[in-house]
Image (cartoon, helix red, strand yellow):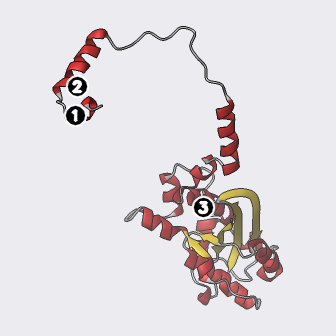
Amino acid sequence: MREIVLDTETTGLDPTDGHRIIEIGCVELYDHVPTGETFHRYLNPERDIPMESQRVHGITEEFVADKPLFAHVVDEMLEFLGDAPLVIHNAGFDLKFLNAELQKVSRPLIQFVRAIDTIDIAKSKFPGARYSLDELCKRFSIDLTSRTKHGALLDASLLAQVYLELIGGRQTKLMLAPSDAVIIAAEVTMQPARIRPIPLAPRITQAELEAHAKFVIDLGADAIWNQA
């Protein structure tokens, strides 16, 4: 099963206020495990980046001045996404921005039913806990040393690890495939039984055997041990 873990960085909190996406990061999963394939682009938002947003992700107007517009990368992004489910932390936020950008370039919007929101999964597994990406990484002992600021590709990579933990996916690769199980079972049955040349000395003493025999007799004739 193919899935895409997706994250964005933006100039602000709401596209209806004119805020835009400035970074998109995507990580491909197969059977919940990263394949190493990613999609990552910085974008020129064609507007200023407020200082409060810069403090979160560290992306400046100077840095993105020569980066492509969303319209220039949208087809490549949509090809990478394909029709895969999208694993997103707080999906409502990212899809709101993505759909605002898609609408600007006359592309079909992404339906919310495609999203797997890891906040919803975390809430069901850990009621009352904190659900930020940082907190979930700490809960699962995922290394955060490289995350001094938010970054779309970095956060998508961390979220892929969190998602695997949330769904218990670490165990999926430990199970034998049916064909492997058949091969191993056949190999086991083909091995001849080994007989010890010298039998092991009994670990039960004669006194213990006699005590056990007396105990069984004392249970009475109705006891299952005393029935032929």
Element on which disc 1 rests: loop
Give the residue displayed 34% in from the left and 14% down from the top.
204
Q: Earlier in the sequence, mark 2 or mark 1?
A: 2
- Residue 223's label in the rendered image is 1
Q: Residue 22 appears at what percent x and percent y?
A: 70, 74
Q: Secondary structure at mark 2?
A: helix
Q: Is residue 81 depicted above or below 130 in this figure?
A: below
| Distance from Cα at disc 1 to Cα at disc 3 | 60 Å
Residue 20 position (above or below residue 224):
below
Spot the residue most to the front. Answer: 228
Q: Is residue 196 positioned above or below 192 on the image? A: above
Q: Which tag, 1 or 3, sits closer to the chain's start?
A: 3
- From the image, state whether disc 1 or disc 3 is nearer to you: 1
Quadrant position of the N terminus in the picture: bottom right
Q: Hey, which quadrant is residue 48 in on the image?
A: bottom right
Marks 3 and 2 sit apart, C-alpha to C-alpha, by: 61 Å
* Picture mark count: 3
Secondary structure, mark 3, is helix
Residue kind at label 3, given as amino acid type: Leu
Asked where in the image residue 29 lies, by quadrant, the reply is: bottom right
Residue 55 is situated, as x and y percent measured from the top left of the image, at 59, 67
Residue to which mark 2 is pinned: 216
| Label 3: few (<14), some (14–19) or many (≥20) C-alpha neighbours in 10 Å | many
Q: Is residue 122 left or right of residue 112?
A: left
- Residue with the mark numbered 3: 159
Could you tell me how far apart the alpha carbons at marks 2 and 1 are, in whole angstroms? 8 Å
Q: Residue at x 76, y 91 (%)?
A: 106
Determine contact: label 3, label 2, CB under 8 Å: no
Q: Are marks 2 and 1 in contact (CB under 8 Å)?
A: yes
Please name the amino acid that badge 1 sits on: Ala
